[in-house]
Each structure stands twice: as C-alpha cells, then as structure tokens.
Image (cartoon, helix red, strand yellow):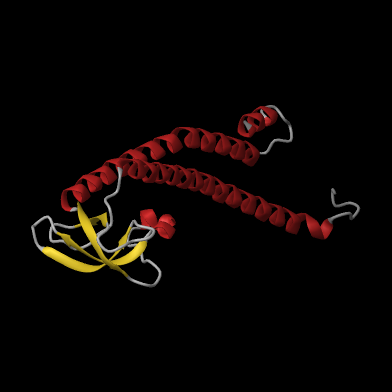
C-alpha cells in the first residue's frame, strides 16, 4: 500500500527525482513478490516436508514394535525418558528393571522407563523396541509430522519474505549512498563560491 501511495504521490510532483520513482517501484515490486512467492514457498516446503515426514513415519512403524514388558523391580533415581515426545510427562514415569520378549522371540532384561507412577514387581507396561528387542522411542505420529511440516512451511515463507525485503533494503541503501555521493560532488563544485557576489550563486 505504501508503495502504491508513493507512486501516486510522486507521479507528477515537480520535485520528484528519478531515484524517488525507482524506490517507489522497487517497493511495489517487493510487495508483489512477497504476495506471490511467500505463499508458494510456504506451501511447497510444507508439502515436501510433510511427504518426507510421513515416509519417515511409515518406515519407523515398520521397524519399531510395541511389546509388553514386566516389572522386576523399581530402580531408584530420576527416570531418563529416551522419547523426547513424552519428556513432559516424566513425572508419570518410573525407571524400572524389566523383562520383555522381542518381536524375534528373544528374551531381554534391562533398565527401562515405564509409564507407571508406582510400579510393583509383576506390573505390565508397554514399550517400544526394534526387531531385535533394543529399546527405542515410539514412532512419530501423523499429527506430529503434520505440525513439523507446517512449521517448516512457515519458516520457509518467513525466510523468503526476509530475503526479498533484505534485497530491497540493500538496493535502496545503494541508491541513497549514490545520492549522497552526488550531493558531495555538487557541493565540492559549488561550495568554494557559495554566497560570493558575482559568482552566479
């Protein structure tokens, strides 16, 4: 809007300099580029990120399995949750010595984090392992993948807008620098004779 106002204001102004018109057109072009390219960039990056993340979700679901674990005893000390998606719920988790059977049929025993607030020997809980029984974090879900993709799209859109605006500001800065240089040159020519009678000033 400011670009349009600037163009209209300087259209027939006798004090208009060529650089003023260039700045106004530059602002208008930047506005149009932002209006067109920012949504396109956000959508393209968000869509590509979503496809990649959903592919990762499918791969994780193929190699990660939910199995039943049984508490042998509780281990003292703060729980260490290997899954960052559930780190906010650590107060509802306990570190226990447990046993479980891997998808390949092998038996495993080890210290794990159980979703039990007060675990007792014999209590059962669910945990995620790979095909060989090694404990892993739960796979990414579709909702989380969508959220991450949306954030990637927003970040890309903001980056494109910042690049366009940054380029515009650099060009305007160069215009201002050249304008000041011309003023300095003009002053060097007129300055020594400024105010003297008979010099045409």
What x and y, as percent, mark residue 74?
32, 68
Q: Residue furthest front?
A: 121
How many numbered circles are shown?
Answer: 0
Q: Is residue 44 left or right of residue 64?
A: right
Nearer-the-camera pick, 60 or 110: 110
Position of 176 relative to 15 (above/below): below
Residue 37 quadrant: top left
* In-front residue for pair 55/94: 94
Q: Residue furthest left?
A: 105
Position of residue 115 measured from the top left corner of the image (x, y, whole percent):
34, 56
Q: Is residue 127 above or below residue 110?
A: above
Q: Quadrant of residue 150?
A: top left
Q: Is residue 65 left or right of residue 162?
A: left
Give the residue drawn at x 81%, y 60%.
Answer: 192
Q: Residue furthest right?
A: 197
Q: Quadrant of residue 72?
A: bottom left
* Viewer-closest of 75 and 6: 75
Quadrant including the N terminus:
top right
Q: Position of residue 80 (x, y in %)?
A: 36, 66
Which residue is depicted at the point 50% across and 33% down? 32
Residue 24 image position (x, y, % from top left): 61, 36
Horizontal side of residue 91 vs 182, given as left or right? left
Q: Out of 108 and 151, give the one closest to the viewer.
A: 108
């Amino acid at each position: 809007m400011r670009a349009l106002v600037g163009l209209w204001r300087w259209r027939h102004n006798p004090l208009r300099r060529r650089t003023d018109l260039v700045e106004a057109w530059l602002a208008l072009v930047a506005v149009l580029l932002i209006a067109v390219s920012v949504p396109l960039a956000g959508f393209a990056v968000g869509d590509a990120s979503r496809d990649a993340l959903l592919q990762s979700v499918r791969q994780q679901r193929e190699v990660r399995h939910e199995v039943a674990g049984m508490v042998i005893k509780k281990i003292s000390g703060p729980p260490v949750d290997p899954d960052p998606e559930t780190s906010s719920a650590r107060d509802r988790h306990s570190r226990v010595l447990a046993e479980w059977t891997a998808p390949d049929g092998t038996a495993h025993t080890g210290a794990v984090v159980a979703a039990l607030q007060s675990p007792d020997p014999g209590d059962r809980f669910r945990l995620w392992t790979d095909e060989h029984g090694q404990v892993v974090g739960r796979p990414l879900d579709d909702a989380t993948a969508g959220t991450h993709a949306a954030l990637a799209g927003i970040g890309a859109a903001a980056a494109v807008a910042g690049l366009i605006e940054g380029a515009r500001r650099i060009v305007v800065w160069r215009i201002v620098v050249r304008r000041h240089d011309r003023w300095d040159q003009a002053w060097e020519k007129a300055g020594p004779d400024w105010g003297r009678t008979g010099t045409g000033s």
